[in-house]
Image (cartoon, rainbow, N blue to C red):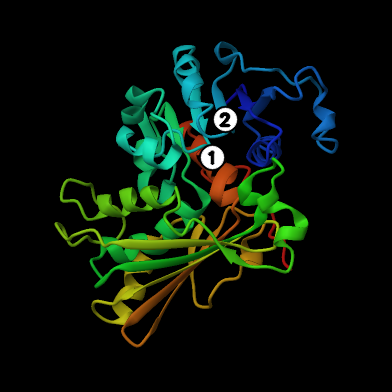
Amino acid sequence: MASKLKAAVAGANGYAGMTAVNLLAQHPGVELAQLTSRSYAGKPYAEVYPLLGLSGEFLAEPAAGEVDVVFSCLPHNVGAGKAAAWLEAGARVIDMSADFRLHDSALYPTWYRQPHPQPDLLAKAVLGLPELHESELKDAALVAVPGCYSTAAILALAPAVSAGLVGSDIVVDAKSGVSGSGRSPGIGVHFSEVNESLSAYAIEGHRHLPEVIQELSALTSPLAGEVGAQRRVGSAAPAITFVPHLVPMTRGILATCYFDLKGSLDELKDAYREFYSGQPFTKVVDKTPATKQTSHSNLCLVNVAAQGRKAVITSALDNLIKGASGQGVECFNIAFGFERTTALDGPMQWP
């Protein structure tokens, strides 16, 4: 591609926005044309990005008619009202919030406390999980990047559900670093509240749960297209209990998933290897992964094991990269015809 695509990042001063900017600054096919932030409008980029050498000033809002793509890193319930105008101006939109992840508009009042402001757009949105939706992403004008917990849980469970090897309800025990709560200060992420402490939250139901149910249910539908391993068509979607925990670390997610196993452990392992064969970022590993192994990378590492007849699947990822902006850039690459790994294949940082 001779000329670079022009990108705007809306909400460029939050963690997702900052991560997107840092990744896109390394992308050979992207010009960072606009960075927006209401709180930083009129201020130089260097106030947020002193090391990138970017010239320019923050705008209050994107001028979508002047760019090819808008990466929307705005808070939930904020970007939904703006996306239609961006699309009408000719830009494609990659949304990092939850505003377009759920297909059913009736779910938004339950999980996000207000009706969806643009329900007509939900049918146009493609969930930005390339391992399941790569073919749809190629023509998507509106991409809804899934949540960090959702990504970890779906990638941990999709091969087993798709292959019909889940014989019971599923329990997902997930733990996240504090950056998953965003950059805005609050009592729940205050240092003295979270340091040297571990706690569960959203016991009554976390807002990422309906995303997991939606995607795993689709894998059991006889109307859904083939994805990865061969599917047992018509099997019922399993019930899911999902409990998140806050861990006193900056970044990372570890999800441990339990269910009764149908078939053998070898069959289960084969299903995962087949499902993720050729995938550049989701890797089946022989040892239970640690979050540090995925830190600052777009990797999701998955281990398949069992205790007797109980399957134990663990997945680890960086909540700001594969769980947010890295996956957004991965979707951008697919949508605009770049190699899927462009700007995402930097060296690993271990330890």
Give neighbour class at mark 2: few <14, some 14-19, many 20+ (Cα, 10 Å). many
x%, y% of residue 93? 49, 26
Q: Which of 292/150 is in front?
A: 150
Look at 22% across and 55% down and name the residue there. 220
- When the figure is inspected, residue 6 is found, relative to residue 214, above or below; the finding is above
x%, y% of residue 119? 34, 25
Q: Disc 2 to disc 1, how far (Cα)?
A: 8 Å
- When the figure is inspected, residue 227 is found, relative to residue 195, above or below; the finding is above
SS at mark 2 in the image: strand
- Tag 1 or tag 2, which sits nearer the N-term? 2
Identified by mark 1, the residue type is: Gly
Indicate left or right for 206 with 13 as reference.
Answer: left
Residue designated by label 1 = 328
Query: Does any portion of residue 141 appear in the rendered image?
Result: yes
In the rendered image, the residue lying farthest to the bottom is: 308
Residue designated by label 2 = 71
Tell me whether circle 2 and circle 1 mark residues in contact (CB < 8 Å). Answer: yes
- When the figure is inspected, residue 158 is found, relative to residue 134, above or below; the finding is below
Query: Does any portion of residue 345 appear in the rendered image?
Result: no
